[in-house]
Image (cartoon, helix red, strand yellow):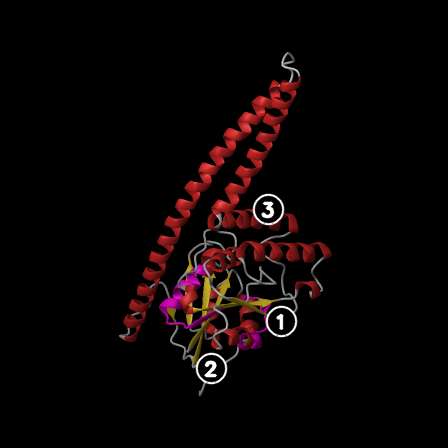
Amino acid sequence: MKLIIQIPCLNERDHLGPTLADLPRRIDGIDSIEVLVIDDGSTDGTSVRAVELGVHHVVRFPKNRGLSAAYMAGIEASLRLGADIIVNTDADNQYPGPDIARLIEPILAGRADVVIGNRQTDKIPHFSWLKRRMQRWGSGMVRRVSGTRITDATSGFRAIRREAAYRLFVHNRFSYTLETIIHLGRSGIVFDDIPLVTNPTRRPSRLFTSVPQYLRRNGPVILRAYAMYRPVQTFFSLALVLFACGAVLVGRFAYLYARDPAYAGHTQSLVVGVGAVILSFLVGLFAMLSDLLAGNRRLLEDVLARVRRLDAEASMLAAERGAPVEGVQSTGALPWRKNA
């Protein structure tokens, strides 16, 4: 059983040392552990420092592409490197390294495909009251949309089984955290979470600087993901609302006209009501078309998952013959083995 711990980085040269030192070298049930650093266009020599610290693999972008791209590049590389379980953690050592053993335990036991570390945001001292409320509201929204019971949806400390990673896709450039839960949850992947206590913060978040900015960037992600994976529910509900409003207005006109046919002062209700009814049928048509597109998208995701599996298997076979893995700089450092 091979575990790869991936660490997306952006100018994290000064934080990598403590983070790597905190990672476990041995875990029961795991035969080998390797560390993969994804350098997202750093300008401070992060990838050079990672090699000096003895990481096993590095993926480097020449320019910054965003957290989602870095996360998915790590997933792709880990699959090609033969990982059975992939753990994602932050470079600033926010998440305790020893908790990785607890994080992967539900996967090793066969109880879950994806496990997320619950930071217990209500207990984090530096979180403001508003931020705690927004975290709770956002996680609740993701639970309803995804059909999962995840408590801390924005946590980046997560483990994923190889078979689930084949089906992982991210369509937004901001953050992978919410969309991956919605996507995999709606695909029938089994989730679990574990409570943990985070380490003291070393630097402010680089994803967003305020709660309004977080809502502005993550709100559309939730709405788009829900519309993508639940198109009928999204558009058909809107169509029903429009039809109900139109029917009420048309009914109001009909009632008043029946009482006094000579009075023509309520034609506005008729015009707006008929417009709302027509619009409701158009939105209903959009719902049908969106459902057809969603069916095609599911077929394409099945094909892409198979292609990803074949690509990973081909890369592993090539690696056994000594060929390098595409897009990955392997340092030659020995894996951390159980019996070493």
The kind of residue tagged 3 is Arg
Q: Are marks 2 and 1 in contact (CB under 8 Å)?
A: no
Local crowd size for mark 2, using a 10 Å CA cut-off: few (<14), some (14–19), many (≥20): some
Local crowd size for mark 3, using a 10 Å CA cut-off: few (<14), some (14–19), many (≥20): few
- Give x and y (percent) for residue 336: 45, 81
Q: Distance between the residues labelled 3 and 1?
A: 28 Å
What residue is disc 3 on?
A: 216
Q: Residue 29 carries which label?
A: 2
Q: Do the residues labelled 3 and 1 touch (CB within 8 Å)?
A: no
Residue that appears at 51% across and 34% down: 280
Q: Quadrant of residue 98?
A: bottom right
Residue that appears at 53% across and 69% down: 16
Q: What stretch is highlighted in magenta?
A: 72-101
Q: Residue 68 carries which label?
A: none
* Precedes in sequence: disc 2 or disc 1: 2
Q: Distance between the residues labelled 2 and 1?
A: 21 Å
Q: Residue 196 carries which label?
A: 1
Residue 83 lies in the magenta stretch: yes
Q: Distance between the residues labelled 3 and 2?
A: 42 Å
* Precedes in sequence: disc 3 or disc 1: 1
